[in-house]
Amino acid sequence: MYRIIRAQALAPTVTRFEIEAPFIARKRKPGNFVMIRIDDHGERIPLTLADSDPAAGTITIIVQAIGKTTKQLCAKKSGESILDVVGPLGTPTPIEDHGKVVCVGGGVGTAELYPITRALKEAGNTVYSIVGARSRELVILEHEMQAISDTLFITTDDGSYGRKGFVTDQLKELLDTVPGIGAVFAIGPLPMMRAVANLTRPYAVHTLVSLNTVMVDGTGMCGGCRVTVNGTMKFACVDGPEFDGHTVDFDELMMRNRTYVAQERISEELHVCRLTGETREAHR
Amino acid sequence: MSTINPLKPSERMKIPRQEPLEQDAAARSVNFLEVSFGFDMDRTVTEAQRCLDCKTPYCVDGCPVGIDIPGFIKLVIDKDYVGAVRKIREANYLPAICGRVCPQETQCEELCVMGKKLTPVAIGKMERFVADYEMREKLFTPPVIRDHREEKVAVVGSGPAGLTCAAELAQKGYKVTVFEALHAVGGVLRYGIPEFRLPKEILDIETERIKALGVEILTNFVVGRTATIDEFFDEWGFSAIFLATGAGTPTFMGIPGESLSGVYSANEFLTRVNLMGAYRFPDYDTPIRIGRQVAVIGGGNTAMDAVRTAKRLGAEEAYLIYRRSRAEMPARQEEIHHAEQEGIKLLLLTNPTRIIADDQNWVAGIECQKMELGEPDESGRRRPVAVKGSEFVLPVQTIVEAIGQKPNPIIQSTTPGLSTSKRGTVVTDDGQKTSRPGIFAGGDLARGGATVILAMRDGKNAAAAIHTYLTDRRSSTTDHA
Ligand SMILES: Cc1cc2nc3c(=O)[nH]c(=O)nc-3n(C[C@H](O)[C@H](O)[C@H](O)COP(=O)(O)OP(=O)(O)OC[C@H]3O[C@@H](n4cnc5c(N)ncnc54)[C@H](O)[C@@H]3O)c2cc1C
Ligand code: SF4
Ligand code: FES
């Protein structure tokens, strides 16, 4: 059992958890993730490590309630526990001094971007960050990102905060006006990362994206997380999750990620029914 | 104690080999309950009377861990079932598991003298009965551990190799910690072999018995990531390490269409079902999607387990596609036989060439070509060659590839100085020693895909080698003092 030391709401559907996991806390690097399973009937899902405190023996994850498991997790309070947490998994982000970098986070992807941005800053980069969200209340980690960025831009789809539009609008402006951008790090929904990669390709700026795939074990034993990168099969959980965005077959990945939509709906409905005490029939 | 078979050899030879009790084929092909009930007590005793108690028991030569087979059979004749299972346990710590999954027909039973002219003694089914009897009657008593030693040993991986090594070392008095990457113990016994062949309850009981020896098991611990081998030596205070991480990385055929939804590796398919309980979705959260027609590619135990699982998950047609002929199939005969009874269709001498998609990027079919057997290849088996113009398309919506696994590289790539082969296995000598002092390896990690009993043999050998290594080290440090 892994105890939740602190649960804190960051946005209406986004919660930050500090969880007791001393071994993982000691070894975490930017770009690493954990697999968690809430209870005995639960699924194993990957969650990126946003931070860790080796002295306190805790790790930080930031979770958006979107599916059954994440909703169940986000309903947990300080003092409650999670059955399984394993990690740190995946290949850490290569951190170098590129001179100037742009870090682009979309939605809860900003949480995954945060530790990478911080490491890039510490490595001496001039950091431009772009945080995008659908609307104002979904903008997360603004102050944290502000503190580790030389310049922070916010975009919202509806214009309720920052610049109205997509992260790519802001990114294009930077690419056109700031000379010498050495690399772009983009983490967010797949369509966003694909758009970023398509945008930077003609500029030939190295672009790293972090792929969220279907995963079962997270250690390289199932192949469920396979993606086509540069024409060859890679396992996102061990070879990634970060890859050169210009070589990823996004279309294929987006289709693969739809494999279980029907089942996910059943799972979620059932979960809601259990919470509200309604029966499945009544729900129909 | 009388240990003499009252029957004359000629009388023993007249007794027919006993048939195991099994769940009806139609009923079982839609449930996950155990297929074989094995022998009841009467059958076990009758079967035991068939044994000729040979002066030179060839059966023992066929047993990778050298169980005293005629010895335990004599105890069965005496109806001392607990004595019999204790006799087995002297050589094999997991008899209830081996009695179910060992390929006896190519080991002890293949060499049994009775098999030369008649049918071999059903050694495996008797092993299973006495082990189950002891479990059912709760007559197990843990061995008494007399020595206590200071050294700590780490065992990495909780499959049959790791569990056996841990049990052996604990009985020698070492402090043993087993590290397991997954959330549950057992390796392939947990995530690979289905409930209908090996009920997980048996694995749970065996695991508890190993813990009762004082072995500590840490799950959710990926060695190489959560801590490295060198940290185990330098910071955790382990004096020796046994690597038994198996061969868990799936390989894919490399044919077009493998990224489509509906294509699984056997590992993913079986892990979803066995480890994660997807066959009880939505009661369990992990989903699996099964088409009306399912094709499993491969001819080994893994392929058999996958195709029989697919049938149980509701596939109307479950095909097994194998490019050689039946005689070359590496799967256990009993499993092939069971599969056919359950209505699995074997497409032999058939090789997949391409996976066909529907407009939603789901699998719609698999294109195959017919093969014929040509000249023998390096493995001594006749090489299958394609028959020109024999392509055909089989409509299927789910495909499971069970064409082999290789070792997971996480530890090898984070442990400097550990020699590996081209196939990715860790290189060891006969005593399970690797290229690094204090590090031993065995099971599928050293062999590539093999068997449960060979993994257990490696675990035993490694325990003996670790004991020698640590004893030598102890005496050399006192010599210098
Ligand atoms: C579906 C299937 C059916 C089979 N059926 C049979 C059969 O009927 N009879 C038979 O004799 N054999 C059978 N086999 C083969 C047999 O199961 C294996 O040969 C045997 O399990 C190997 O044992 P092992 O201990 O070496 O490894 P495994 O059983 O593979 O166990 C290795 C363990 O190590 C863990 N691990 C891996 N990496 C790490 C790490 N870095 N840190 C910590 N832990 C790690 C894994 O999670 C796993 O639990 C079958 C295999 C499969 C896949
Ligand atoms: S070879 Fe067969 S008959 Fe002889 S001792 Fe072994 S089991 Fe009995
Ligand atoms: S999640 Fe199973 S191999 Fe990557």
Image (cartoon, coloured by chain):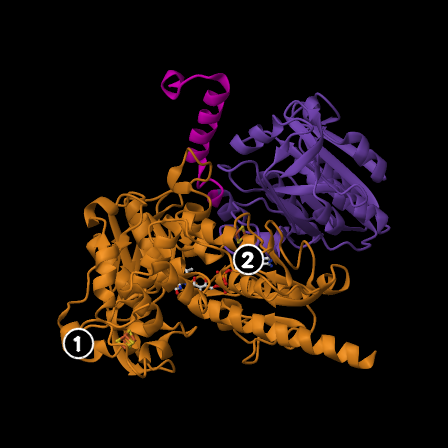
**Does residue B210 appear in this view?**
yes
Instruction: Tell me residue B358's x, y (percent).
Output: 35, 45
User: Pointer 1: residues within 10 angstroms few (<14), some, or many (20+)?
Assistant: few
Q: Quadrant of the C terminus of chain B?
A: bottom right
Q: Amino acid at mark 2?
A: Lys
Task: Based on the picture, tell me whether residue A277 belongs to the magenta stretch.
Answer: yes
Q: Amino acid at mark 1?
A: Lys
- Classify mark 1: helix, strand or loop: loop
* Mark 1 → mark 2, Cα distance in angstroms: 64 Å
Q: Is residue B141 left or right of residue B410?
A: left
Q: Quadrant of the N terminus of chain B?
A: bottom left
Instruction: Tell me residue B155's x, y (percent).
Output: 60, 62
Determine which residue is flagged by label 2.
Answer: A234
Is the residue at mark 2 in contact range of ligand 3, meaning its CB lies under 8 Å from it? no
Q: Chain letter for mark 1, please.
A: B
From what the image shows, is residue B275 above or below residue A276? below
Which mark, residue B336? none
- Classify mark 2: helix, strand or loop: strand
Q: Chain letter for mark 2, please.
A: A
Determine which residue is flagged by label 1.
Answer: B8
Looking at this view, is A74 or A149 the one in front? A74
**Does residue B258 appear in this view?**
no
Magenta highlight: main SS: helix
Task: Based on the picture, tell me whether residue A180 belongs to the magenta stretch.
Answer: no
Q: Is residue B2 left or right of residue A163?
A: left
Looking at this view, is B101 or A31 the one in front? B101
From what the image shows, is residue B45 above or below residue A278? below
Residue stretch rendered in magenta on the structure = A255-284
Q: Colour of chain A?
A: purple
- Spot the orange chain and give its letter: B
Whether tag 1 and tag 2 are in contact, CB under 8 A, the answer is no
Residue B39 found in image quarter: bottom left
